[in-house]
Image (cartoon, rainbow, N blue to C red):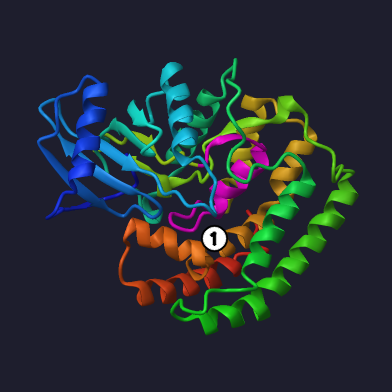
Amino acid sequence: MSSVTAAEASPDVDAALLALAQRLTAQAGKASPTGLTRLAGGRNNQVYRLDTADGPLVLKRYFTDARDTRDRLGAEWNFVSHAWSRGVHVVPEPLACDRAEQAGLYGFVEGRKLTAAELAPVHVDAAIDFVLAVNAPPRPALAPGSEACFSLAEHIATVERRVARLATLDADVPHVAEARQFVATQLQPAWADVKATILSGAAAEGLAFETAIPADQVCLSPSDFGFHNALIDHQGKLTFLDFEYAGRDDPAKLVSDFFCQPEVPVPLAVHEHFIERLTEGLGLDTASVTRCRLLLDAYQVKWTCIILNDFLPLGATRRAFADTGAWAQRCAAQLAKAEAQLGLIGATSD
């Protein structure tokens, strides 16, 4: 139940991990695992395929750190459980979880990742359909999503914090000198320009800066939403994955994240179509629609910062937990991706 495409055998299965898998399968009423294989590709967590007599399942162990207090298991479990309770089965089935161990057991999803080249309007509409389905009333009172924003001021502050964090990078991370130069000479000046444009645009549109958006304009957001967190099967069905940041949020953040995530870029040509369908399906008001358009470049900056997370101490710890390997090569690649992401500022859907 993770956006992974390849499996690698685990030569030494930890006894505690196997015991955890056995407890969760028993809790779910499933057969005991006969095999456990680490799946490659998890960026923040450890994900395993469990082979059982009932078919394959997925065990996910969530990253935890005293410096990162996000309840990744709780966010994902609550969101996916809500979806399944409403008959929305384009997400993995939640089977069992262990809060103390920060682990969850889910149904296995067959499929592969979409490539940017094959991405089509039908896939974008499937993503919108999913968002509208999980937002069908009545909506549960889920916790706010990770970095949820409920005012224009909070959107600005969220990006501001991420940019500020990059002012001090981990000296032990490979290519940190180049990363520091990029942050100082390109990222920080770009953010200053984007912020000024947003503030002037908000003033021109009469948007309240500090006032919280109305409760009826808040949505349930998958967060970190995009085709990088989706699998497509041989029949063309999409399944959406990885909701560890999900919760209540501003639709403008959902839209902006969807179009700014860098792994499987969504063409800006369908940006207005996405907004129009959400406007109709969620009943967005004029202010919400304006935020959807106004904040796009702010989230290009935010995603540039996210790409550079590996240069932060916590980012290094999280990636080490996920065991991505090839550290120096990865850092060089992330820096190149960050430069490309920042270059998207000012792009339009025209």
Q: In this rendered view, identify the residue nearer to me: 343 or 224.
A: 224
Image location (x, y in percent) of residue 190: 70, 70
Determine the residue positioned at 71% across, 47% down.
293
Left or right: where does residue 298 sit relative to residue 257? right
The magenta stretch is 245-267
Image location (x, y in percent) of residue 63: 41, 49
Q: In this rendered view, identify the residue nearer to me: 305 or 287.
A: 305
Position of the N terminus, as image quadrant, is top left
Badge 1 element: helix
Is residue 50 depicted above or below 319 in this figure?
above
Q: How many marks?
A: 1
Is residue 33 depicted above or below 200 in this figure?
above
Is any part of residue 122 visible from this angle? yes
Is any part of residue 57 visible from this angle? no
Image location (x, y in percent) of residue 237: 33, 33
Left or right: where does residue 134 sit relative to residue 150? left
Q: Which residue is mark 1?
A: 306
Image location (x, y in percent) of residue 214: 78, 29
Q: In this rendered view, identify the residue nearer to me: 152 or 54.
A: 54
